[in-house]
Amino acid sequence: MSGRIPIDGGLRRLVSHWLLQTVWKRQDFVVILMFLVGALMCVAFLIVIKRQWDVALLAVPEGCYCVGGKVG
């Protein structure tokens, strides 16, 4: 029992060691990072598109409908 590492500190050390060994030193880290950056850019792009769409909808005055190319 005296040789056991406390769960708190030991687990933290084990996780950080595992991260360093498996993720940081491999190319997988770069792939995961690129994937996360790509996902964030995709979400940001969608948010910008939605905002632009909302602004475009707000720019059309109420009661005006485009019928056959004529506003009326």
Image: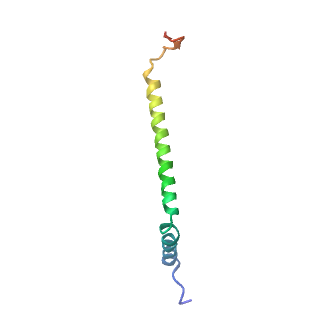
Q: How many marks?
A: 0
Residue, far front = 27
Residue, far right = 1
Viewer-side residue, 25 vs 56: 25
| Residue 69 image offset from top left, x and y in percent | 51, 12
Q: Residue at x 46, y 46 (%)?
A: 41
Q: What colouring style does the render use?
A: rainbow
Q: Residue at x 57, y 89 (%)?
A: 1
| Residue 34 image offset from top left, x and y in percent | 48, 54
Viewer-side residue, 3 vs 22: 22
In the rendered view, would you say 71 is above or below 16?
above
| Residue 45 image offset from top left, x and y in percent | 47, 40
Residue, far bottom = 2
In the rendered view, would you say 34 is above or below 2?
above
Q: Residue at x 51, y 14 (%)?
A: 65
In the rendered view, would you say 67 is above or below 7?
above
| Residue 8 image offset from top left, x and y in percent | 50, 76
Viewer-side residue, 42 vs 13: 42
